[in-house]
Amino acid sequence: MLDVLYYPVSLVMRLWHDLFAALLGPTSGVAWALSVVFLVLTVRALLLRPAWTRMRAARITRALAPQLSALRERHRSDPRALAAATTDLHRRHGSSPVAGLGTALLQIPVFVALLHVLRSFNRPGLSFEQNAMIANYAFDPDQVASFLQARLFGAPLSAWTAMPAEQLASFGGTVVTPGAVAAVVVPLAVLAALATHLSMRFARAEVTGQPAGVARVTAVLPWVAPAAVLAGGLLFPVPVALLLYWTTGGVATLVQQVVLGRMLDRRPPSVPEPVPVAPPVRAPRPGARPVTRSAGRGRGRRGRRTGKDRGR
């Protein structure tokens, strides 16, 4: 059912591997690692425009913070009116409160597809010879065998820390030990968590004027998300290549934010000064006679004429 995701992801990875294999050899672990790295960079290049839109929207939201605060104060008892007024304010300034949200959402299917493709190289219960006879989406059997024999600092790219010994033995070539896998997984997991933390802190610094509840959540995320990445890499069946994907993605996100942030600093979005909002006019009480400015002036003139008459 998800072949529509698995084939494109495996095809992009295969094209990059074909390029690096011509330089480094088909069974080179570095060639396979670079194919994963450039798969990430390909996805990032495709999502560069949405990332720019998201960061520009964040800058506009920061400039609109006083007006957004005034709207929240004015419509604090009417969430529907607040949402409509907020959307209208962003629309008038060429932005959206959910601009660029697809940047993060579109990466989820790529991540899931890559996880499935990587785990399909080494199917449980099959020997190296049996796995090497089965194609893996865009990879033919020869490339499957090449992937299984490749090592990155002594660890297969689809191995994880708690992988069963019989499955480690099915990679072929040199014997793989859990310690050799852990020696690669632990540094990659730490780097992935660190890159996630730094990129999320940078993204949080770009956004201001959030409601109190949202601000508390965004303040915690730069610590919770890296902890989840670290725990996932060390405790769950996350392959080495997927950790490499996480690490590259975190570093690419951080570099992208710094570069786009500097570009936006040179061309900041123009937002006009907030227009003072007049206080709402209160309706008169039922049965009360409305008081107008002209009536007040009339009574004043009559009062002055009455004083003159008295003087006479």
Image (spheres, rainbow, N blue to C red):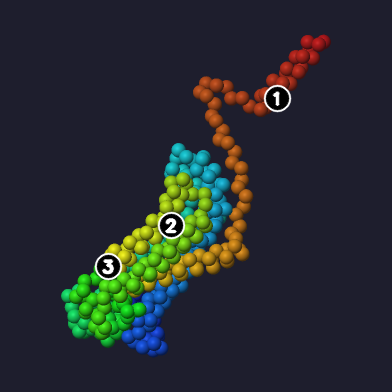
User: Within 10 angstroms of label 1, few (less than 14), some, or many (20 or more) residues?
Assistant: few
Decide which of 148, 307 is in the foreground and name it. Answer: 148
Task: Label 2: state its secondary structure.
Answer: helix
Q: Left or right: where does residue 17 sit relative to residue 165?
A: right
The x, y position of residue 56, in whole percent, is 53, 60
- Mark closest to the chain's N terminus, 1 or 2: 2
Question: Gap in Å between the C-alphas at discs 2 and 3?
Answer: 23 Å
Q: Where does label 3 land, which residue?
A: 237
Point 38% across, 56% down: residue: 224
Q: Where does label 1 land, which residue?
A: 297
Specify the farthest residue to the right.
Answer: 312
Task: Label 1: state its secondary structure.
Answer: helix
User: Within 10 angstroms of label 3, few (less than 14), some, or many (20 or more) residues?
Assistant: some
Q: Where does label 2 land, which residue?
A: 222
Q: Are marks 3 and 1 in contact (CB under 8 Å)?
A: no
Decide which of 127, 286 is in the foreground and name it. Answer: 127
Residue kind at label 2, given as amino acid type? Pro
